[in-house]
Amino acid sequence: MFKFWGDGSDFSKELIRNIVVRSTENFNWTFIFILAVVFYVYWSEIHKKRYEVVFAGLALYGVHWLYEIANAIIAKITGYPLWAVSNESTTFILLIGVCWELSMMFSLAGIISFKMLPEDRNKRYFAKGKFKGISCKLVGAIEMALLFALFESFLAGTSNHSFIWVYKWWGVIPVFFTTYIPFFLASNYVPDMDPKKRKIFLIVEWGLVALLLAILIPLGII
């Protein structure tokens, strides 16, 4: 059921070669429903003026897109991405490593992580004597990263190949450290940044995402 590492098999490579990005062959109405749910969540937070929650969601989602763009570039250069999603597992593939359902989930993941933090976000665990303890934001990021890495392991082992890992050195451990920890660090720390620095971070992050997509998709690179 769980798969912890890529196997480098010809079968996995063939699955990658069969992926059709942005094909509407499997498209259905769940696409619209999921989009409506995401809009509802964001506008509910905006209506309640809980802007820090919105910042958390946007911070993680922007990092997610930068990672997916990088993964698609890796696929173009080497022939295979670090991770991919199969045609059979989704209604629409955005880039080789991310489908619509997965991307919309990540648009909410930062909000979920931020809301799971203690009410006092300055709280520190294991503080004793001169040791100042560990920030609840860091602990929360590690916990969420572990949960997501394990769930990705489950997806990689599904019969419809929801997640495909090719490289033998890529799996749960590198996903945990290099991907999910940065995701949740963004959602947990960015909302409490100095307002000016937070604004710069989000503008640069999303500006870079928009620029890369606008250039690389028409060129056929991603």
Image: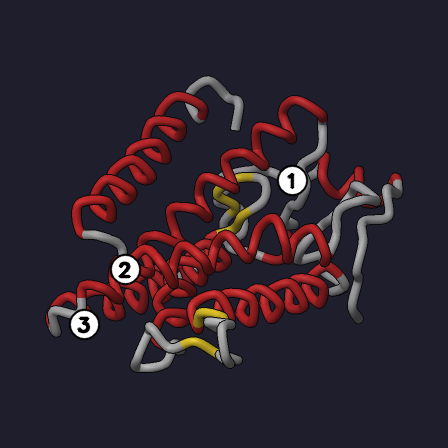
| Residue 163: x %, y % from top left | 67, 54
Q: Which residue occupies 15% across, 66% down?
A: 46
Mark 1 to mark 2 CA distance (whole Å) = 37 Å
**Cβ atoms under marks 3 and 2 closer than 8 Å:** no
Circle 1: residue type = Ile
Sequence-first tag of 1 and 2: 1
Real-space Cα separation, disc 3 to disc 2, in angstroms: 17 Å
> Residue type at mark 3?
Ser
For mark 2, what is the residue?
191
Which of the 4 quarters of the picture holds residue 12? top right
Q: Is residue 86 above or below residue 154?
A: above
For marks 1 and 3, give the one nearer the viewer: 3
Residue 90: horizontal and vertical position, in percent?
Answer: 56, 56
Q: Nearer the viewer, residue 218 or 210?
A: 210
Q: How many marks?
A: 3
Is 121 on the left or on the right of 125, as rendered?
left
Q: Which residue is mark 3?
A: 44
Identify residue type, mark 2: Pro
Lower sequence index among marks 3 and 2: 3
In the picture, which quadrant includes the N terminus? bottom right
In the picture, measured across the screen, residue 134 lies left or right of residue 170, that is left
- Residue matched to label 1: 19
Residue placed at 18% from the left, 72% from the top?
44
The tag earlier along the polypeptide, 1 or 3, is: 1
**Does dot 1 land on a helix, a strand or a loop?**
loop
Q: Residues within 10 Å of mark 2 (few under 14, many from 20)?
A: many
Of the two numbered discs 3 and 2 in the rendering, the one whose residue sits closer to the viewer: 2
Residue in the foreground of this view, choosing between 160 and 49: 49
Is 79 rendered above or below residue 47? above
